[in-house]
Image (cartoon, rainbow, N blue to C red):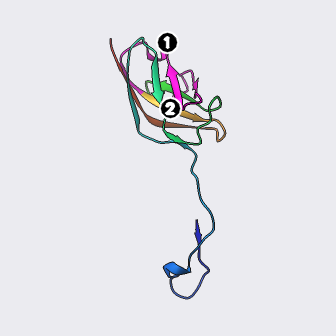
Amino acid sequence: ICYAAASPGYPLPWEFLRVGKLVVVGPQEVQWTTCAAGQTCVVELAGVGLEAGVDSVSVSSTDCADGSAEPTAVNEDDTVRLEGAQIAYGGSMVLCYHLHAAGVTVDIGRVVIRGP
């Protein structure tokens, strides 16, 4: 983060002072994973400040706002294991990340499930 005092005209590049750093916490968007129907699926997450055991991931056949999917906690190694009814049948599912500290759920990608 940079700061420049207000002055007549535009501040020149050397008039800026670095005063801090901004870190945006959360998952990176557009993550794609392919899994086999009926098998455990390990999704490797990418992002900054992901909170293991606090934040969670779910999959949905429609969108992240429907709230129909059971969330699964993020592991210490920034992975999540999807299994059972979550990926029982083939298709394309929306991958939803639940940022519990912010009370927000975001669409971060897709899980393609191969199979019937």
Label 1 belongs to which residue? Answer: 84
Q: CA distance from mark 1 to mark 2?
A: 17 Å
| Residue visible at 58% across and 34% down in the picture | 98
Amino acid identity at mark 2:
Cys
For the residue pair 11 and 94, the one nearer the viewer reads as 11
Residue 90 sits in quarter: top left
89 in the magenta segment: yes
Percent x, y for residue 100?
Answer: 64, 35
Answer above or below: position of 112 versus 15: above
Q: Say what secondary structure mark 1 lies in.
A: helix
Residue 75 visible in the displayed image: yes
- Which quadrant would the N terminus be assigned to in this image? bottom right
Amino acid identity at mark 1:
Gly
Answer above or below: position of 112 versus 40: below
For the residue pair 28 and 62, the one nearer the viewer reads as 28
17 in the magenta segment: no
Where residue 96 is drawn, which disc sits there?
Answer: 2
